Image (cartoon, rainbow, N blue to C red):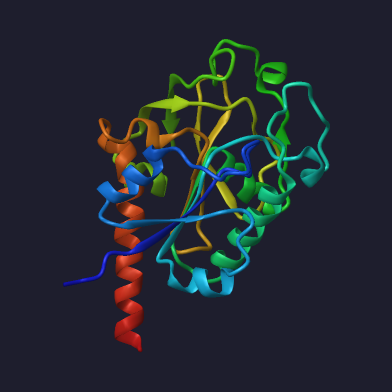
Amino acid sequence: MMKKPLIGLTTYGRDEKNAFSLPAQYLESVRRAGAVPFLIAPDETELDEILPMLSGLILTGGGDMNPESYHGDSHETIYMIDDERDQAEINIFNRFYETGRPILGICRGMQIINVAWGGDLIAHLPDQFGETVLHRAPPRVPTPHTVKLDPDSRLAQLMEVSEAEISSWHHQALNRVADPWKVVAHAPDGVIEAVECHQHPWLYAVQWHPELTAAKDPSQQRLFDKLVTASQEMSNSTQIAA
């Protein structure tokens, strides 16, 4: 029997109870895709042992990045700053990128990848885009809206849609997009909602939270399914080459 792929997922930072956590929907989405989730806490010191075991990586959502990490301005709405998590995830992404194995960034994960490559963020979307489209309901609650994907993009082909109803849960987004990202989706107000990288075999990032609706929306579950499929194919080709 073929072994199930091991997919790494970064966790939230250390909370007031000195605990690390991650919403169960992330793990459930990975399991539905036929893989085994493996949680990586920000204080992990054994990456040399862990990263080679992983078939794929998901950089998850959570609180805001420290604006100092991208030379940005502070804002009163910025919350849950965690330098330990910021630096850990940038390091994990950079190291895993070199393996060529599949990577998916979700919400904060998309922002981490952009900052890791020299991009920056919009501190608070309503200040620049207004509130014609809510990307997060008060006080900090997920809310739905549509996104339009470039129909010629790899992401649209992967998800098998050119427009999607998504679950949005953020107040920041990409501003200056780093090379070699290609923007492939926008919200109705123009906010960047997804990017892909053509210099890597399988690297996508979305600003929304597919794990929240993946159980009922096949287009969202495909992000996890295709990551797992790609990780299996790469693993098989590596074994054959060896």
Asked if one can make out residue 117 in the rendered structure from this viewpoint, the answer is no
Relative depth, front residue between 162 and 35 = 35
Name the outermost residue toward the left: 1
Whole-percent x, y for residue 201 in the image: 44, 64
Residue shown at the point (57%, 54%) measured from the top left: 41
**x and y percentages locating residue 173 in the rendered image:** 63, 33
Res 175 → quadrant:
top right
Is 133 displayed left or right of 66 in the figure?
left
Quarter in which the N terminus is drawn: bottom left
Tell me where residue 134 appears, x and y as whole percent: 54, 15
Q: Nearer the viewer, residue 178 or 9?
A: 9
Q: Quadrant of the C terminus?
A: bottom left
Residue drawn at 74 percent across, 47 percent down: 83
Can you give x and y, in whole percent of width and height, for residue 228 in the image?
A: 32, 57
Quarter of image, res 78: top right
Residue under the point 58% across and 40% down: 108
Q: Is residue 155 left or right of residue 21?
A: left
Residue at figure coordinates x 37%, y 63% from the top left: 6
Please indicate whether residue 46 sits to the left or right of residue 236 in the image.
right
Whether residue 138 can be seen here? yes
Q: Residue furthest front?
A: 17
Tally the marks.
Answer: 0
For this orientation, the residue located farthest to the bottom is: 242
